[in-house]
Image: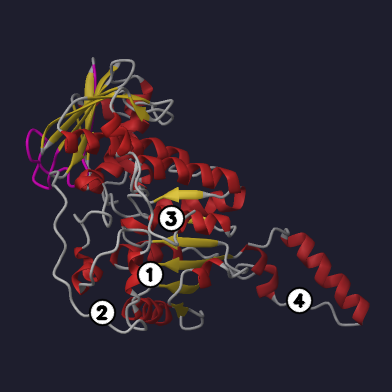
Amino acid sequence: MTKQRNTTRREFVKKSALALGIPTIIPSSVLGLNGQVAPSNQVVLGGVGIGRRGRKDLSCFLKQPEVRFVTTADPQKERRESIQRYVSKLYPNQECKPVQDMYDVFQREDIDVVLIATGDRWHATASMIAAQHGKDIYSEKPCTMTIRESQELDDTILRYGRVFQAGTQRRSVDNFKVAANLAHSGKLGKLTSVYAGIIRLEADQPWLPAKPEPDKSEIDWNRWLGPSPWRPFNKAYCDGRWRGHHGLATGYKLLEWGSHTIDLCQWAAAKDGTTPVEYEAIDDTSVHAKYADGLKLVMRLAGFKGEGDWKPGLGSCPVRFEGDEGWVEAGDFGKIEVSDPKLLEGQTYDPELYGTDPIKHVRNFLDCVKTREKPVCNSTVARYGHVAGHAAAISWKLGRKLQFDPKAEAFVGDDEANRMRSRARRAPWHV
């Protein structure tokens, strides 16, 4: 976005007009009057890999008055043209030119911000390439495929001085904020356990049957795979059946919900700069972890109807924060459960704001794009929350308790586990 202030822009226009003998009548659109946003305050947005979830994010961006969406990139022709039709219908006067190659988005000098809404395999790599091109980034989750990629993403964002927001939007949702505030305030007493709802862990699925590749103009299969390991084409992957497949999705499904709920537990426990030091998978439904100070992090199966001992009716991605004087639970249905109703005295929240709505999260990001402050789910916050999730998934995969050093971000005395912290990216997508 243009870094000049409005007053500087007006003075420049006025002086130029006087020098040329032109009357100094300046259109209101240039000055940002009559409810219009001046060009100097606009945020120009481009998209990469926008599908069903990305469209939800995009709708929130488009509701912000300063945002101008100009292009979307996708290796699938149908998807990129679908987004063009969607934007053109809502905003007939906005240009939205679809392209196949994401580099055509990153290399545009007029674009300030990119929305990365691909599948898991591309999130971190595309975000780092965008940062190298001077873009600020809003990335869907899970943001990384491995522990090593979590480190690389944060290091890259910091190195290039970019604003990054992970799409773990529940930090911006009212009922989760109230729950975290109760933990921070001491009203629950000393925290003893934090609970993160997850879905059932599963081993990687086998390859789908090979099908003839379509013309590259319809689906660029090589670009769709990107940094993930090569496999034969099957359109089902492109239609959303990539989840659960090695190299395409991450963490044996632990981070599907865990990237949100572990993040919320880290936040409530004031652990954003660290991770647990011990992980032990109990079964396909539960992984237990422990921080250096003894606080327990319990990742356990949850569902819309309250599976296990979760309270029914909270919705997806529930969390529970327990202290020695009380507890609180929250979930996506906008509700809160507490051990004592008095805990909610003086607390206000909108129970109609559903946990998957990123509208406030997008607003927080755009405000930080302008101020250059760190958003609520910046790259460092995402780093440690994702590292914790990946470490838990490795414990489940290996079927044993693991010790972890948060400073080194490495397992203690376990070479096999440490080898699983990273994986190679397929050429040429190295960062």
Indicate left or right for 374 with 323 as reference.
right
SS for tag 4? Answer: loop
Residue type, numbered disc 3: Thr
What separation in Å lies between label 4 and label 3 (alpha carbons)?
A: 44 Å
Residue at the spot of label 4: 26
Q: Earlier in the sequence, mark 2 or mark 3?
A: 3
Callout in the foreground (4, 1): 1
SS for tag 2? Answer: loop
Q: Quadrant of the N terminus?
A: bottom right
Callout in the foreground (2, 3): 2
SS for tag 1? Answer: helix
Relative height, residue 332 to residue 280 (above, below): below
Q: Circle 2: is it few (<14), some (14-19), or many (20+) Cα within 10 Å?
A: some
Q: Residue at x 33, y 15 (%)?
A: 293
Callout in the foreground (2, 4): 2
Q: As rendered, which of 66 and 95 lies closer to the eye?
A: 95
What separation in Å lies between label 1 and label 2 (alpha carbons)?
A: 13 Å
In reply to whether residue 146 is colored magenta, the answer given is no
Residue 145 percent across, percent down from the top left: 33, 48
**Boundaries of the magenta span:** 301-323
Residue at the spot of label 3: 125
SS for tag 3? Answer: helix
Q: Earlier in the sequence, mark 4 or mark 1?
A: 4
Indicate left or right for 270 with 8 as reference.
left
Asked if one can make out residue 181 in the rendered structure from this viewpoint, the answer is no
Q: As rendered, which of 370 and 255 lies closer to the eye?
A: 255
Q: Earlier in the sequence, mark 4 or mark 3?
A: 4
Main SS of the magenta part reads loop
